[in-house]
Image (cartoon, grey):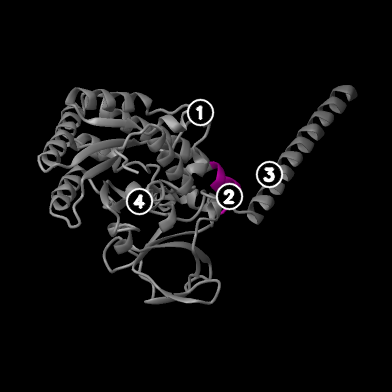
């Protein structure tokens, strides 16, 4: 009987020691996590500029870390300076925390950096082309400009542009002065027309280009709100949410191109691209398309949108549209994180733009007269 009681006490002691070790480990991890900030798992991207529903307003003038006053029109700010991308560090007067910001000269980007050059080429597209989150010297327009001494590249990129906006841009380009003799459309996979069903699904996911943790935090239950005060719980939940949302985002893109849910809209989009080509060529303006990849690979290093690129290239060939797959220079990279602006923002950074510009020239995709 005594041996049984002794064995029972030993088991209880072992269980208690095990629980104590687990709690101690959790406490140590919790303390350590409170001392560090893991980029991309906190904060949000903030737009600054003119007064409208999507812009956060700052004073007309702010001071950067060098003490120099400057004026701005629009820009983007992030809670950390990933890859030292930012131009300015601005202190939020409400909470005293720093924002790391990039400001944009829209006029300079539009007219190009050498407007007096012999040839004028316009690049059109959405925020990838405009250069959300990147300095002027890291934009596609600037980098293309450095590759040829006779060509000026006008940046007609427009954040949030859809295929209808691209058509409108090309109509305006036809009337532009100085004369543009070539248009390059950097096609983003989200440029495709979407059915109501696809668009509804897209509104319910985070998407890579602007990860919004605040959106997820609004869905916390009362218990979740209490647990969210734990750094360990917050980290674990955000890691899980990111994996879940990544899966949903990938599936949504695949539905845009590879399912019957959006087949009609995809074909209409390709017809729009062919119509742009015909419209421009009627005015003696060349037209080319470059597919800019989504900067995401899964944990196994697989690019889940490769079949989408193949589908687009096939459609371009059938329609007689000159089209280049911009994923190719990224094929051998196991991860594409280093090519993004910020862990909260999967827009391409300067390194990504340099890689794709080099590939364009390597493939001889444009008409160069140097």
Mark 2, residue position: 38
Viewer-nearest of discs 4 and 2? 4
Residue sitting nearer the eye, 208 or 276: 276
Q: Residue furthest front?
A: 370
Asked which secondary structure carries label 2, the reply is loop
- Point 45% across, 48% down: residue: 349
Residue 234 lies in magenta, yes or no? yes
- Viewer-nearest of discs 1 and 2: 1
Q: Earlier in the sequence, mark 1 or mark 4?
A: 4
Classify residue 65 as left or right of residue 103: right
Identify which residue, 328 or 160, lies in the foreground: 328
Residue under pointer 1 = 332
Mark 4 — residue? 141
Of the residues under marks 3 and 2, which one precedes in the sequence? 3
Give the magenta-colored segment's residue range.
229-236
- Where does the image place residue 115, in percent across and percent down from the top left? 29, 59
Mark 4 to mark 3 CA distance (whole Å): 50 Å
User: Is residue 295 one of those drawn in magenta?
Assistant: no
- SS class of the residue under badge 4? helix
Q: Residue at x 52, y 42 (%)?
A: 338
Relative to 51, 79 lies left or right: right
Question: Which residue in the structure is indicated by mark 3?
Answer: 26
């Amino acid at each position: 009987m005594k041996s049984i009681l002794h064995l029972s006490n030993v088991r209880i002691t072992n269980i208690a020691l095990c629980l104590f070790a687990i709690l101690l480990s959790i406490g140590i991890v919790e303390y350590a996590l409170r001392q560090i900030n893991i980029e991309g798992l906190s904060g949000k991207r903030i737009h600054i500029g003119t007064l409208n529903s999507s812009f956060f307003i700052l004073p007309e003038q702010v001071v950067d870390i060098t003490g120099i006053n400057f004026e701005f029109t629009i820009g983007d700010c992030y809670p950390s300076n990933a890859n030292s991308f930012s131009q300015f560090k601005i202190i939020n007067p409400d909470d005293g925390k720093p924002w790391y910001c990039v400001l944009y000269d829209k006029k300079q980007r539009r007219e190009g950096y050498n407007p007096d050059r012999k040839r004028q080429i316009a690049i059109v597209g959405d925020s990838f082309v405009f250069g959300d989150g990147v300095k002027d010297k890291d934009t596609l327009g600037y980098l293309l400009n450095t590759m040829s001494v006779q060509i000026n590249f006008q940046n007609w990129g427009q954040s949030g542009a859809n295929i209808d906006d691209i058509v409108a841009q090309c109509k305006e380009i036809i009337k532009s002065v100085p004369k543009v003799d070539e248009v390059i459309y950097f096609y983003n996979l989200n440029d495709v027309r979407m059915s109501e069903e696809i668009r509804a699904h897209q509104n319910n996911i985070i998407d890579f280009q602007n990860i919004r943790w605040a959106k997820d935090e609004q869905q916390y239950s009362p218990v979740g709100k209490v647990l969210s005060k734990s750094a360990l719980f917050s980290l674990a939940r955000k890691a899980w949410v990111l994996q879940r949302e990544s899966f949903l985002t990938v599936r949504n893109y695949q539905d845009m191109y590879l399912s019957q849910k959006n087949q009609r809209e995809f074909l209409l989009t390709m017809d729009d691209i062919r119509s742009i080509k015909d419209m421009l060529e009627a005015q003696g303006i060349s037209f080319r398309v470059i597919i800019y990849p989504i900067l995401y690979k899964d944990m196994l290093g697989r690019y889940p949108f490769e079949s989408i690129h193949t589908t687009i290239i096939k459609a371009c060939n059938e329609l007689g549209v000159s089209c280049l797959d911009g994923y190719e220079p990224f094929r051998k990279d196991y991860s594409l994180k280093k090519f993004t602006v910020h862990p909260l923002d999967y827009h391409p950074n300067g390194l990504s733009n340099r890689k794709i510009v080099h590939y364009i020239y390597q493939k001889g995709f444009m008409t160069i007269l140097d």
